[in-house]
Amino acid sequence: MSLKFAILTSLTEREGSGIELARRFDKSIGYFWPATHQQIYRELDRLTTDGLIRELPQEGPPRRGQPKRFAVTADGRVLLEGWVGEPDEPEPMRSTLAVRVRAAAVTGRTDELRHALEHHRRRRKDLLEHYLAIEERDFPAVDPSNVRGVLQHRVLTLGIEGERSWLAWCDETLDALDRLRVRGG
Amino acid sequence: MSLKFAILTSLTEREGSGIELARRFDKSIGYFWPATHQQIYRELDRLTTDGLIRELPQEGPPRRGQPKRFAVTADGRVLLEGWVGEPDEPEPMRSTLAVRVRAAAVTGRTDELRHALEHHRRRRKDLLEHYLAIEERDFPAVDPSNVRGVLQHRVLTLGIEGERSWLAWCDETLDALDRLRVRGG
DNA sequence: CGTCACATGTAAAGCGTTACATGATTGT
DNA sequence: ACAATCATGTAACGCTTTACATGTGACG
């Protein structure tokens, strides 16, 4: 549902071809709305049909293997601006790790759970460090009156705080497992 | 992918019919792995075919509109126990609200963004309070050597800490918008 | 007898993922 | 000429969601 608006946003920043969008997604919007190039091509078709974006003219005849460049139309811009303010429902949480914890609660397999938790913890830590590196590189000092900079930084902060929260939870849960081992045998 | 194991977990706790599972999901496992009754019925079929659960015999002939009760088989139990310890990859984040913030960064529609953020914040607060009420009701005092109690509480804590993190982020972002309004005009 | 809730189930549409196909460009 | 890479696109499958369908039991 949001892919449409993620693409409109990216194309509003600057025009681009399908593959360019796919690459931009891989290192910015994709952190909170992942998409493959196939999804993006399909969506670009739809957006063109709906008149929200248009294909820019290129030199020579259209050929396969040639990049098509797209830009947002006035309609697309208006739609995106209106969408920003729509009431936003949190997406329901979906965590395989939580299911594993629940399964361990029922089966008693706490040693196995520890492995899953430790692996997960490492991945969360990697993600956090990755986000922190981006912050240091792209937002060394944010001008608090620069709308664009502030808001882009807020998005990054969402990732950072999220990973910190996950990391803390993993640590607390591993501690709880330790205490279970000591006391319960 | 995890629905299968969520059902095995729930049926290991106690046997039950499709609709019972759907209701249990609505107020426990469904908080971190939502599922509708249609998904559950389909998965029950598959699990039965695969020999991981079996239909319990009931009095009288099988009739439509009569509940079928299911229980986990030995194979199912073994599979679930092995699954607990598998290395667990974090699911990629997916947040419509983050896309909205990014869209506001590009379009400059900060007043509209404020509406979306305030609405989202209210929902997160409701969720947090809901989880805290469950904690107070079901885990007034957790025995730290009770495997089942401790782990079930850890899952609830994941929800609580997650919502707290979201709430804090919403507040910080609303503050940032205030500061933008004051300074930038 | 009609209606409602219950329990199971079917159908269709949308989104996401994976694998593969096709033509053009670049490099050796 | 050949291979590798780029850019677009097709196809198929699985999961999720929504709407609807069918039969049963309970209640007034």
Image (cartoon, coloured by chain):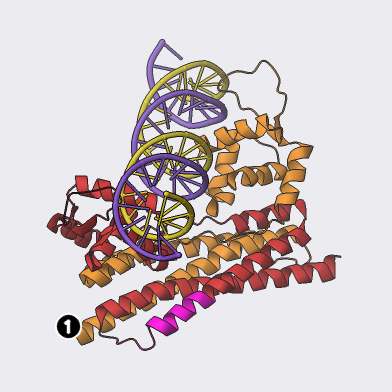
Chain colours: A red, B orange, C purple, D yellow
Image quadrant assignment for residue C25: bottom left
Image quadrant assignment for residue A104: bottom right
Q: Is residue A175 left or right of residue A97?
A: right
> Label 1 is placed on what type of residue?
Gly
Residue A19: x %, y % from top left: 34, 58
The answer to whether residue B49 is above or below residue B148 is: above
Magenta-drawn segment = A129-141
The answer to whether residue C28 is above or below residue A139 is: above
Residue A53 part of the magenta segment: no
Q: Quadrant of the C terminus of chain B?
A: bottom left
Residue at 24% in and 70% down: B106
Mark 1 crowdedness (10 Å alpha carbons): few <14, some 14-19, many ≥20? few
Q: Is residue B3 visible?
A: yes
Q: Main secondary structure of the magenta part?
A: helix
Q: Is residue B26 left or right of residue A28?
A: right
Residue at 53% in and 46% down: B26
Residue B35: x %, y % from top left: 52, 44
**Front-lying residue, B154 or A83:** A83
**Front-lying residue, A130 or A102:** A130
The residue positioned farthest toward the left in the image shown = A74
Residue at 46% in and 71% down: A159
List the residue tagged with mark 1. B185
Q: Is residue B62 left or right of residue A32?
A: right
